[in-house]
Image (spheres, grey):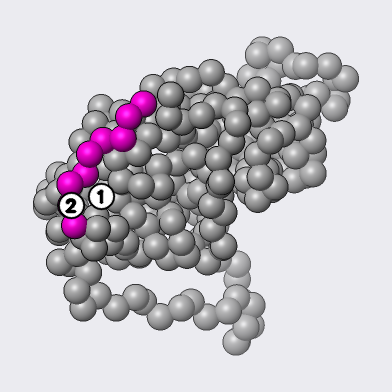
Amino acid sequence: MQVYPVNLDPEIRDFTVDRRFMSQFWGGNNQETFPKIAQKFLDVHHMDDFMYLNLNMNPHAPQMPGAPGLFFSSRSNVGNAEWYRSETQRVFSRIDSWKWQYMGQYKMERAAPLTVEEWNRQHHVVVSTWAHKVSKSGYGTRCRAIVHLRHQLGRKPTKAEIGQALQRGNQFKNVTKEQITHALRQGWLTLFVWKMKCVGYDVGFQHDLIERSAGWVPPPPKPPKNQGTPRTGLKRKRKEPLDAVDSDDESADEEPVYIPKGTKTRPIVV
């Protein structure tokens, strides 16, 4: 894949934004890879193609506007998911804490899943992040079911057995991060891969980001949890849909960013 030419002054091209800023002006949850945009925002900007990639989960996401990349997912049916709603994705990559850079408009093409060898060459930050997310998230339920059944049955579960287990409504939260790590290392679980090819760059959109950022002030930090007056009740936790796609958690922007130095397998530029 070739790099799509983005002929802009570097100061404009490399401008970054905060996801809280994006949520305020363009809509969408600031934790999701593919945020759903409310109608009130769509009526204004008509953009429903946002894709946000964290390098701790997608180490081969584009890191330069126009560059190709790879997208990892724990789900094999991403192309059929409700969020996959446009021919191209408006891609942002998190290049530093609180800094997200617009990379361009990308087409996605299914590639072969990661092999065990390829996965085991991933940086420990990527391995740890994926194991944590899969062990805790709604989108990791199927993976946890597979690991649970593998231990219970002593063999690889069939698709029918996995489906029956999921239909019972069990979230399989008994499966630990360490068990997920082991399952990925052994190839019991597989990450699926999509090739990302840049096919365009919305220059007007990038200028709009810069103009709207002028004078924007980040919201104050949230107060520490479990401090202050005792709570009389528990806050209802937002339910995460099972088809959510490998989203970040609320602390993702505060985490250090892993910048990959390249890999001998699955090169991006071919």
Q: Is residue 52 visible?
A: no
Image quadrant where residue 157 sits:
top right
Image quadrant where residue 2 sits:
top left
**Residue 232 horizontal side relative to residue 209, left or right:** right
Please give the label number shown on residue 101. none
**Residue at image mark 2:** 8
Judging depth in this view, the residue of 246 and 3 nearest the camera is 3
**Residue 155 horizontal side relative to residue 119, left or right:** right
Query: Closer to the N terminus: mark 2 or mark 1?
Result: 2
**Residue 112 horizontal side relative to residue 269, left or right:** right
Q: Residue at x 66, y 12 (%)?
A: 160
Crowding at label 1, few (<14), some or many (≥20) Cα neighbours within 10 Å? few
In the picture, the quarter occupied by the N terminus is top left
Q: Is residue 192 magenta?
A: no
Amino acid found under the numbered disc labelled 2: Leu
Specify start and end residues of the magenta stretch as a single range: 1-9
Amino acid found under the numbered disc labelled 1: Ala
Judging depth in this view, the residue of 97 and 6 nearest the camera is 6
Label 2 element class = loop
Q: Residue at x 88, y 20 (%)?
A: 154
Please state the horizontal and vertical placement of residue 26, each as a whole percent of the image.
Answer: 23, 55
Q: Is residue 6 magenta?
A: yes
Q: Residue at x 57, y 62 (%)?
A: 256
Label 1 element class = loop
The overriding secondary structure of the stretch rendered in magenta is loop
Please state the horizontal and vertical placement of residue 31, each as a whole percent of the image.
Answer: 45, 54
The single residue placed furthest to the bottom in the displayed view is 228
Judging depth in this view, the residue of 257 and 30 nearest the camera is 257
Q: Residue at x 52, y 23 (%)?
A: 76
